[in-house]
Image (cartoon, rainbow, N blue to C red):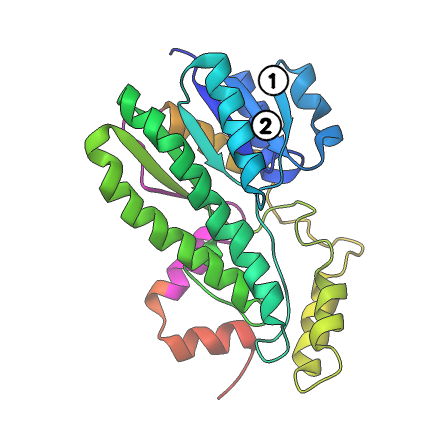
Amino acid sequence: MAAKICLVTGASSGIGHATALELLRGGHVVYGAARRVHMMEAIREAGGHALPMDVTKEEDLQRVVRAVLDAHQRIDVLVNNAGAVVHGAVEDTPLAMARDEFEVNVFAPARLTQLVLPQMRAQGSGTIVNVSSIGGEIALPLGAWYYASKHALEAFSDTLRMEVEPFGIDVVVIQPGIIRTDFEAGTARQLREISGNGAYRQMVEAMARAAEPGPGQDNQASDPDVVATAIRQAIESDQPETRYVMGWQGEALLRLNRTLSDREFDALVTGSRR
């Protein structure tokens, strides 16, 4: 198939980094964008491009999209992968942190989408891939703002898909399960800082201990390559699925959420007998 011009955000590590390299292996032209440009050297060495970008800065978003369009006069694929997470009880988490979460996880993908759509409409084709999570459909304790932002991203994607389909543009949602990355490396510390000394400390400590690295910890989490493979499959398909689920416990947790009652699912994930 013909090489596609791809822009991948959050490409300095984890899923974004693996996706950029996988698309390069597929023969595509790849621009990786992230704040930590020095961590994208492998992308350059594989033949890709590394651009500095802070997704919360409008001037950065415009500059990166313009750089791709100036070089190729088209853009075929946007992978909105950059993300952030905050852990803490709803009662304790400052709303400023919640707003920052939405800025990265919802408004940045929305703005990049606005910037690439005029060219995609003009060329009559394109694929927008929004990296969500199984947390875009389920919710667990002590991460309300992350789950809320991913739920919002999925609703945004569903509406967008219906709006742009007449122009030959596909919108795909990626729902990873538990993936082995450094995305949540600070989970235990953040939980204890925000909610470790208050009314939720018992729940916080249990989750913090489970999140801390240790012998044998995280062995079952899936490699980011499984997500990268799904993204490549989606952008190379003539008719991609609207959602792709992959990674450890992804399908299982979504199935349980869809079949159990709300209270049954609550009890399952919290260990409550109520």
What label does residue 274 carry, if any? none
Q: Position of residue 264 (x, y in %)?
A: 41, 77
Asked if the stretch drawn in magenta spans residue 249, the answer is yes
Q: Quadrant of residue 172?
A: top left
In the drawing, does residue 208 fall left or right of residue 124? right
Q: Residue at x 57, y 66 (%)?
A: 143
Mark 1: which secondary structure?
loop
Q: Quadrant of residue 244?
A: top left
What's the amino acid at mark 2?
Gly
Q: Position of residue 133 (x, y in %)?
A: 48, 51
| Residue, disc 1 | 48
| Residue, disc 2 | 32
State the residue lying farthest toward the top. 2
Tell me whether the residue at label 1 lies in contact with that at label 2, contact meaning CB atoms closer than 8 angstroms: yes
Q: Position of residue 228 (x, y in %)?
A: 52, 32
In the drawing, does residue 266 fall left or right of residue 56? left
Q: Which residues are magenta?
A: 237-257
User: Is residue 228 shown to the viewer in this render?
Assistant: yes
N-terminal label among 1 and 2: 2
Q: Residue at x 59, y 58 (%)?
A: 100
Looking at the image, is 229 positioned above or below residue 261? above
Residue neighbourhood size for the residue with mark 1, other residues' Cα within 10 Å, grouped as few (<14), some (14–19), many (≥20): many
Q: Residue at x 35, y 75 (%)?
A: 261
Q: Residue at x 53, y 53 (%)?
A: 103
Residue 155 or 65: which is nearer the viewer?
A: 65
Asked if the stretch drawn in magenta spans residue 164, the answer is no
How many numbered discs sit on the rendered protein?
2
In the drawing, does residue 58 fall left or right of residue 154? right
Mark 2: which secondary structure?
strand
What's the amino acid at mark 1?
Gly
Q: Position of residue 170 (x, y in %)?
A: 31, 33
In the drawing, does residue 167 fall left or right of residue 82? left
